[in-house]
């Protein structure tokens, strides 16, 4: 070591401690790149050779297996900066700049604090004083090169991944209902219950038009939705859970269900505090999109139509919404009426009079919600709804019989489809019970420590099977009461007089509103 280098170490530095920072980027490097780790620990002898007692050379190695791209999750580096800032460190040792930081912000912050507290920095090439201009310039250049090296490594890896994705050969995490076969091709999940449930999700949304109505339909009929466990001891296994809004929305926005290979649909953006946030990208910014790449549950046209309906539903909540999904209520034109004065979408308000009659008013708030202006206009909806209803009766009456037959067939088809899925759930419970029984019967009875556990699992599966069978029979009986022969004859009888059905007070307002939109 040169004399000039030794002159940088003064008595004031030796009065303080020497801090050796050790880091490897990944856990794999910790176990495989042992030579690099040994070289970092060997710097402790350099500090002793410079005059620091061995008991005052503090090794910080709690960041082994942590990336140096950011200091947010590196407790060891944060501790090092704190010790330097409090003036306890005479020198900071690191094999190279990349071991301390691969981020210019973190590196220059450490240099600034070292310069203020008169703390030296040592790497494999020599000793530097951040308070001196030339040393500070050289350390800054090394930090820039370390960050550039990380960028080039990432760019190479990213380029290889993107090139493979553009060919459609990169394996991505598939949504439930799609799996890879032995050749690496995307195919339907061989589990028929999974396929039928996924198809029912898209069919129900196509029929109802909203995600909430789809979720209510699944909940009403006691149907569960499959999902893959992504973490824990049961990672990769299939679980059946109630359909949630997040799962339904994710399925509707997933192009893989439409037979498209899609990659780069989202990105992570770094925040000022160092954390990263998840951001979804519009379709025109996706990195890879290959249509008709594998079997599909829906066509690409259906996928785009579903996305458009979801956007329209979201816009229905905004100030200048241009459409609205069907809502429940006696008003026929809710979400459809446009103010003739200002062009804004009109809201619906209901007033209950003393005699219990509910009156409908179509109200235009105009600029009142944002600027406090008075109402633009308010129109009583009784006359408007009556006129629209009469137009609907005149248009539908000739098709009443065909409509009744279609309704009857649709109700029967829906119940048969639901009954089929419920029966699948019973079959799955039966399979799990049989598997538990098989595991128990194959065990040596003398091995009581394991036999007790397997017996308890078998009993639990049998209880689940009994509950599934009981629930299936109860719901099946309830469905048959809905569409018994008497009910079918009633539908056919009323179909010949559609005006009577329309004006019947027992006709649900939600059904009337849906008919007016169609």
Image (spheres, grey):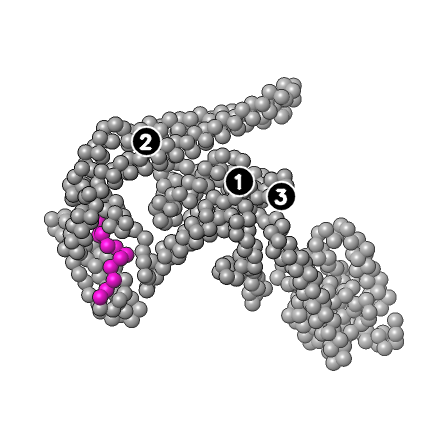
User: How far apart are the alpha carbons under marks 1 and 2?
Assistant: 30 Å
Q: Residues within 10 Å of mark 2 (few under 14, many from 20)?
A: some
Query: Residue at left 48%, top 48%?
Result: 258
Q: Position of residue 99 (x, y in %)?
A: 73, 63
Q: Are marks 1 and 2 in contact (CB under 8 Å)?
A: no
Query: Residue at left 78%, top 54%?
Result: 33
* Residue 330 covered by magenta stretch: yes
Residue occupied by mark 1:
188
Q: Position of residue 101 (x, y in %)?
A: 69, 65
Q: Which SS class for mark 2?
A: helix
Residue occupied by mark 3:
184
Is residue 308 positioned above or below 179 on the image?
below
Q: Give the magenta part as a residue range.
A: 329-340
Q: Position of residue 264 (x, y in %)?
A: 56, 57
Q: Which SS class for mark 1?
A: strand
In the picture as drawn, the residue positioned furthest to the left comes out as 355
Name the quadrant containing residue 274: bottom right
User: In this view of the protein, can residue 21 be seen by the observer?
Assistant: yes
Secondary structure mostly taken by the magenta-highlighted segment of the chain: loop
Residue 354 lies left or right of residue 513; in this view the side is left
Residue occupied by mark 2:
479
Q: Which mark is in front, 3 or 2?
A: 3
Residue 171 lies left or right of residue 314; in this view the side is right
Label disc, if present, on residue 511 of the rendered structure: none
Query: Residue at left 61%, top 48%?
Result: 171
* Circle nearer the N terminus (3, 2): 3
* Residue 286 covered by magenta stretch: no
Name the quadrant containing residue 88: bottom right
């Amino acid at each position: 070591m040169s004399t000039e280098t030794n002159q940088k170490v003064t008595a004031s530095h030796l009065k303080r401690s020497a801090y050796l920072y050790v880091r490897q980027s990944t856990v794999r490097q910790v176990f495989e790149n042992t030579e690099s780790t040994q070289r970092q620990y060997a710097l402790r002898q350099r500090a002793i050779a410079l005059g620091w007692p061995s008991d005052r050379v503090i090794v910080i190695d709690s960041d082994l297996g942590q990336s140096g791209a950011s200091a947010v999750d590196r407790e060891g580096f944060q501790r090092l900066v704190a010790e330097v800032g409090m003036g306890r460190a005479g020198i900071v040792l690191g094999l190279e700049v990349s071991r301390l930081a691969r981020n210019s912000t973190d590196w220059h912050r450490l240099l600034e604090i070292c310069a203020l507290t008169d703390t030296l920095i040592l790497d494999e090439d020599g000793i530097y004083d951040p308070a001196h201009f030339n040393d500070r310039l050289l350390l800054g250049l090394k930090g820039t090169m370390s960050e550039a090296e990380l960028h080039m490594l990432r760019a190479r890896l990213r380029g290889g991944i993107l090139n493979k994705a553009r060919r459609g050969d990169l394996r991505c995490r598939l949504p439930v209902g799609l799996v890879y076969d032995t050749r690496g091709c995307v195919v339907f999940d061989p589990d028929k219950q999974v396929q039928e449930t996924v198809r029912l999700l898209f069919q129900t949304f196509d029929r109802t038009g909203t995600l909430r109505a789809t979720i209510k339909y699944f909940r009403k009929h006691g149907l569960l939705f499959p999902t893959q466990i992504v973490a824990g001891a049961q990672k990769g296994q299939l679980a059946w859970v109630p359909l949630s809004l997040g799962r339904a929305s994710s399925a509707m926005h997933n192009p893989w269900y439409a037979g498209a290979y899609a990659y780069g649909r989202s990105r992570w953006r770094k925040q000022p505090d160092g954390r990263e946030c998840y951001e979804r990208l519009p379709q025109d910014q996706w990195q890879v999109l290959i249509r008709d790449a594998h079997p599909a549950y829906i066509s690409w046209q259906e996928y785009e139509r579903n996305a458009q309906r979801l956007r329209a539903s979201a816009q229905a909540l905004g100030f200048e919404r241009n459409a609205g999904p069907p809502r429940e209520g006696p008003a026929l034109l809710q979400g459809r009426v446009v103010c003739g004065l200002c062009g804004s979408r009109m809201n619906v308000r209901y007033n209950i009079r003393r005699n219990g009659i509910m009156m409908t008013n179509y109200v235009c708030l105009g600029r009142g919600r944002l600027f406090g202006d008075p109402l633009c206009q308010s129109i009583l909806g009784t006359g408007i709804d009556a006129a629209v209803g009469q137009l609907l009766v005149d248009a539908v009456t000739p098709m009443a019989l065909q409509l009744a037959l279609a309704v009857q067939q649709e109700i029967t088809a829906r119940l048969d489809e639901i009954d089929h899925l419920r029966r699948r759930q019973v079959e799955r419970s039966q399979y799990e019970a049989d598997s538990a029984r098989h595991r128990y019967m194959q065990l040596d009875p003398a091995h009581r420590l394991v036999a007790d556990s397997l017996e308890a699992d078998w009993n639990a599966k049998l209880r689940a099977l009994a509950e599934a069978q009981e629930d299936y029979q109860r719901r099946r009986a309830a469905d048959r009461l809905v569409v018994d022969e008497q009910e079918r004859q009633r539908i056919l009888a009323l179909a010949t007089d559609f005006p009577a059905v329309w004006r019947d007070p027992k006709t649900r307002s939600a059904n009337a509103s849906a008919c007016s939109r169609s």
